[in-house]
Amino acid sequence: MQTRTPEIWDDAIRRHGHRVYVSVLALGLTPDRAREVVQATWTRLMEQHAVGSLVELDFPGLAIRQARFLALNEMQRRKVEMRVLAAVPEAAPEPNVERVVASREQIERMLDALQTCSPTARKVFRLVYATPGGTCATAAQEVGLSLQRVRQILCETRNHIRRVLEATP
């Protein structure tokens, strides 16, 4: 029986290998990948036959079903991988030196404009924008002003800073 088993598989691969290959190729795999799937198919079928998992060898149907299962399984896995890769954000481009310098200059102009505001306006601005989790309500409690007044101060301060930034190139 040992000598006959390899002959069965050699004959099956020779007679049905091309049909199995074409059925996998029809799913849209590349020719190289289709060959790999077909080789894996025959290897799996031989292993299953050796351990007695296969009751009867119905060729080419059995090989085609196994090959299509492997191919579809791989295609599904690659589809998931592609979705995961598509969801991963690309690395941010390195900052342009000119943009960094311009940004720093704009920050310096903004800080200079903020220095021309009243001490209360500077404190409110710092409490809301420079404090992590800073809100108008917490700033109002801290400086002892109404929430409406804090919002008004912020609006006036932002407007002042905006005018200074627009006036200087």
Image (cartoon, rainbow, N blue to C red):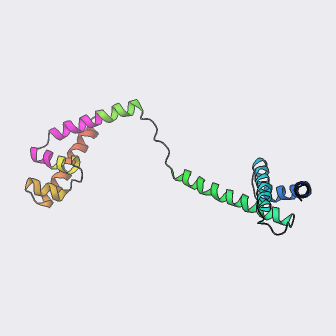
From the top left corner, tell me how far across and down residue 22 is, in percent: 84, 57
Quadrant in the rendering for residue 20 = bottom right
From the top left corner, tell me how far across and down residue 142 is, in percent: 10, 54
**136 vs 25, nearest the viewer:** 25
Residue 24 in view here: yes
| Residue at 63% over, 57% down | 77
Residue 56 in the image: above or below residue 126: below
The total number of labels drawn is 0
**141 vs 122, nearest the viewer:** 141
Q: Quadrant of the N terminus?
A: bottom right
From the top left corner, tell me how far across and down residue 4 is, in percent: 91, 57
User: Is 112 in the magenta?
Assistant: yes
**68 vs 103, nearest the viewer:** 68
Residue 12 in the image: above or below residue 102: below
- Residue 90 in the figure: left or right of residue 68: left
Residue 112 in the image: above or below residue 81: above
- Residue 138 in the figure: left or right of residue 34: left
| Residue at 27% over, 37% down | 107
- Residue 40 in the figure: left or right of residue 148: right
Quadrant in the rendering for residue 149 = bottom left
Residue 119 in the image: above or below residue 136: above
Quadrant in the rendering for residue 68 = bottom right
Q: Which residues are magenta?
A: 105-123
From the top left corner, tell me how far across and down residue 14 is, in percent: 91, 54
| Residue at 50% over, 45% down | 90
Q: State the predominant SS element of the stretch in magenta.
A: helix
